[in-house]
Image (cartoon, rainbow, N blue to C red):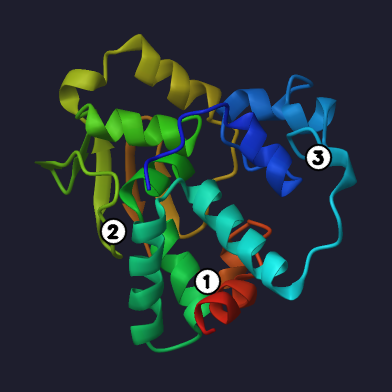
């Protein structure tokens, strides 16, 4: 399945809530949810009550769209989550949160996860002092990401970090805005992940 390249605001409208896919725009009155909260399409306003399967599917699709991963990637992460100790749903969210592009976004070095992926692919970041341009790399405690030396003087990078300086940073990350560095202190607990996803529904869907 190819990556979705259409208007991302339609995805938020389909899920009925903000997924923060367009960065700063999501916090303004221009946000599609603020202007038109109904689901996209001709029959968006008249959708019927979801079945049990429908609720499970929507939970999975919301998580996929929130983190911007493909179906195959998501299934791979779920398999990894079920093999780890603990609750599969929470393990899944921890894995998604530990992605390289998500850490860049959570650290305030990108306005959205989509922008974070683009910046990573274009070699604007290093991981543990080495070149790394794969957004799906899973980080672990002790890993350090930093803006590449050649990118620190770019106005685009400096503006992004300055504009996001007031964003609340997760306590499981140690962010040094002045030096453009972020360290993974620990993997997040469920209460540290501020997204409205019912992960148990995802587990039920894949358990069928």
Give the vertical position of 110 relative to 207 (above or below): above
**Total label count?**
3
Of the residues under marks 2 and 3, which one precedes in the sequence?
3
> 159 or 73, which lies in front?
73
- Residue ranking furthest to the front: 42
From the top left corner, tell me how far across and down residue 175 is, in percent: 41, 44
The answer to whether 192 appears left or right of 53 in the picture is left
From the top left corner, tell me how far across and down residue 1 is, in percent: 38, 48
- Residue ranking furthest to the left: 130
Helix, strand or loop at label 3? It is helix
Q: CA distance from mark 2 to mark 3?
A: 39 Å
Q: CA distance from mark 3 to mark 1?
A: 35 Å
Of the residues under marks 3 and 1, which one precedes in the sequence?
3
The answer to whether 26 appears left or right of 136 in the picture is right
Helix, strand or loop at label 2? It is loop
- Which residue is identified by label 3? 44
From the top left corner, tell me how far across and down residue 49 is, in percent: 86, 62
Where does the C terminus fall, quadrant-wise? bottom right
- Residue ranking furthest to the top: 155
- Which residue is identified by label 2? 139
Disc 1: CA contacts within 10 A as few (<14), some (14-19) or many (>=20): few
Q: Quadrant of residue 63?
A: bottom right
In the rendered structure, find residue 189 and report the number of the disc placed on it: 1
Helix, strand or loop at label 1? It is loop
- Identity of the residue drawn at 73% across and 35% down: 40
> 176 or 6, which lies in front?
6
The answer to whether 164 appears left or right of 44 in the picture is left
Q: Quadrant of residue 55?
A: bottom right
Pointers 3 and 1 in contact (CB under 8 A)?
no
The answer to whether 145 appears left or right of 104 in the picture is left
């Amino acid at each position: 399945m190819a990556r979705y390249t259409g208007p991302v605001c339609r995805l938020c409208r389909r899920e009925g809530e903000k997924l923060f896919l367009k960065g700063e725009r999501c916090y303004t009155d221009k946000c599609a949810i603020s202007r038109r909260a109904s689901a996209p399409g001709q029959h968006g306003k008249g959708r019927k009550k979801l079945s049990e399967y429908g609720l499970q599917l929507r939970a999975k699709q919301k998580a996929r769209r929130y983190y911007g991963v493909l179906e195959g990637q998501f299934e791979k992460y779920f398999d990894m989550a079920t093999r780890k100790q603990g609750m599969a749903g929470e393990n899944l969210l921890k894995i998604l949160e530990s992605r390289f592009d998500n850490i860049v976004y959570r650290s305030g070095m990108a306005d959205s996860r989509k922008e974070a992926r683009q910046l990573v692919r274009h070699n604007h970041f290093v991981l543990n002092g080495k070149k790394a341009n794969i957004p799906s790399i899973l980080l672990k405690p002790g890993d350090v990401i930093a803006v590449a030396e050649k990118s620190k003087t770019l106005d685009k990078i400096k503006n992004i970090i300055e504009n996001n300086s007031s964003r609340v940073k997760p306590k499981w990350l140690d962010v040094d805005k002045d030096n453009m560095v972020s360290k993974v202190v620990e993997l997040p607990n469920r209460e540290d992940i501020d997204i409205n996803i019912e992960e148990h529904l995802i587990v039920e869907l894949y358990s069928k």
